[in-house]
Amino acid sequence: MMSVRDLLFEIGTEEIPASFLSFGLEEIKRLAREELEGAGLKYGGIESYGTPRRLTLYVRSLNERQDDVEEEVRGPLWSQAFDSNGYPTKVALGFAKSRGVGVESLQMREVRGAAYAFAVVRREGRKTFDLLPEMLQRLLKRLIFPKNMYWSDPSVRFARPIRWLVALWGSDVIPVSVGNVRSDRVSRGHRFLGKRSIEIPSAGDYLKLLYSEFVIAHPEKRREKMLSAVAALEKEMGARVELDKDLVEENVNLVEYPVPFYGTFDQSYLDIPEEVLTTTMKKHQRYFPVRDRDGKLVNFFVGISNNQATVMQNVRDGNERVLRARLSDAAFFWEEDRKKGLASRVEDLKAVVYQEKLGSLYQKVESIRELALWLTDHLGLGDKRNLVDRAAFLSKADLVTSMVYEFPELQGVMGREYARCGGEHPEVALALYEQYLPRFAGDQLPKGVVGAIIGLAERAYTIVAIHHVGLEPTASQDPHGLRRASRCINEIIWGLNLDVSMDLLFRKAAEILGSDEKVLDRAFDFFRQRLVVQLKERDFSHGLVGLAVDCIGRRPLQALKLIEVLDGLKEEDWFSNLVTAAIRVRNILVKAKDEVIGEDLSGAEGVELELLEELKMVRPLVEGALSSFDWHEMARLLHRLEGPISRFFDGVMVMDQDLSVRARRLGILREAQGLFDLIGDFTKLKGEVR
């Protein structure tokens, strides 16, 4: 049995940003898997560990060498390789030499009735120790982060400067280097609590030795310790810590040895809007807010220290001072901002540049205001017109407040709060916040239609405006967030059941901007691509999405409703028969493009006449169903058509030898094709129905 050993590869660094660490943990495993499998090395499992100061690969039960490989390589025909007396020819000698085998070892194999010369090439597996240096060196170079640093050697790049390397296979050091750093068996403990150097005898000792020096390398173990200590603090405070998932992840990645603590702040700060307090704690200090049993915010916070101080009260006092300063600033901004109403700040937007070629933020607000009012009328919501107008006018006023200048994450939140304090209508105040919803995939949608309308208007304006100035997204860059804007438009339309014509909305935006048809076409093509992607994400098939978007893609709500109806028909026999017939109609007409197609169909009889009459009767009804977006009625009409068209194909030969009969039947199929084209290309459903 082949012996195995564990592999340890630790990359010691300056503090890696928390947002990079999770990426690095997954990436190093992925790259290691590719390298090991590419080298043909067998192993028991791959794990990755990481703290702000290290990224570690751990491979369990790695075989001591590659398996031997036996490969059969086909060469020339046997008759070309050996003459009639069985002597090898120059062809055989050349083939054998090229494969590193003796000509006498060539074997005859039969392939599809022909005899070939085969070389059986045996390669002895290399030792793992000989493969690892180059493999780990390559892995190190391939480990590229979203942003990388260059230091002493310009060819070396990593998330942060590399300070040490540990590379052990069992107890043997694997030689690896980066810049002027060479691998050995010496790691480092916690920056404040542990030893500067720790000698690792063998890979299996790694986690235990680091733990003894206050480094919990395993992220999950670190999370468990942190959350367990937080739970103990909850009992001590008699309150519940708000454990935001992303903030938990960030704190885990910020420390090597988590030491949770709690602190307090002056209760008077609770008079500030809750989002200001939680944003200050979470975004700026990485603290967890604390709530009472009823969910109300209380004047506690929980922080995670990377240092187990002798007197933790000193840590608490220091963090309380920092938070107190932050909250004091927020309280000052809250008081000062309210002295000037939102409406009086709108004029200040003239001094804020939105985009160099598009003018000021004030100009953008005026454009959104006009577009939002048009959209209100388009949706038949005239009773909301005054509210939409007021909300659109105030929509960006909070951007020039001191609070939002200091805390940009609070845009919209502060607009809502200042509007409430200023006596604005509740729907207007809510709209100032909800105009930004959803902020990301899966986020909550606006509850009020006023905020939804302003959000739709702004996103539509942005898509057209950015195309207007020629700054549309590329495959790798989307600095103005047009993909996110398109996604949000569809989510709002679907979530609030708003039947918006994106064609007309974009056209109105283009009119406001003075854009031409080419800009409008580019903008809508971009939006259409995002619509297709989002519909596919809902697990609708490629063909159904294509058919629905072709039919009514300019109205996202109707596209979704149509595809839901069609998706419900996929298992119906009649629908399968109809799709087959529709595909057959198109194929016959494509092949018959040079044929004479009859204009006068008066000679139709039997199943021909039945189909023709049904087509003439059904077509205006289908057109009516399409214009009223009655997809269930359209499906009923297609069901009605299935019988006549199936009997037509069962009863006649379209390409009859009689040219006049052939022309008439092709003419009937052209009528059928015209009806199908009202809906879309049914060939897209090939293979997708039963």
Image: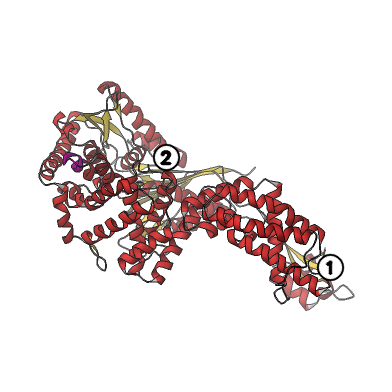
252 and 372: which is toward the camera: 372
Indicate the position of residue 356 as horizontal and vertical percent values: 24, 67
Rounded to the nearest angstrom, the CA distance separating label 1 from label 2 is 58 Å
- Callouts 1 and 2 close, C-beta under 8 Å: no
Residue 419 is covered by the magenta coloring: yes
Label 2 sits on residue: 206
Question: Measured along the vertical axis of the image, is residue 245 above or below residue 313?
Answer: below
Q: In the rendered structure, which segment of residues is drawn in magenta?
A: 417-423
Report if residue 620 is visible in the image: yes
SS at mark 1 in the image: strand
**Amino acid at dot 2:** Tyr
Q: Is residue 592 above or below residue 285?
A: below
Q: Residue at x 47, y 58 (%)?
A: 554
Q: Looking at the image, is mark 1 or mark 2 earlier in the sequence?
A: 1
Packing grade of label 2 (10 A; few <14, some 14-19, many >=20) is: many
621 left or right of 584 in image: left
Image-based side of 352 in relation to 554, left or right:
left
Quarter-wise, where is residue 464 in the image? Answer: bottom left
Q: Position of residue 23 (x, y in %)?
A: 41, 49
Q: Which mark is residue 115?
A: 1
Type of the residue with mark 1: Ala
Q: Which of labels 1 and 2 is toward the front?
A: 1
Left or right: residue 434 versus residue 91 is: left
Callout 2 secondary element: helix
Indicate how the structure is coloured in the image: secondary structure
Q: Main secondary structure of the magenta part?
A: helix
Of residue 96 and residue 564, the one placed in the foreground of this image is 564
Q: Across the whole image, how many numbered discs are drawn on residues?
A: 2
- Please state which of residues 453 and 179 is positioned toward the viewer in this rendering: 453
In the rendered image, the quadrant that contains the N terminus is: top right
Rendering coords of residue 68 (x, y %): 66, 54
Of residues 419 and 484, the one drawn nearer to the viewer in this rendering: 419
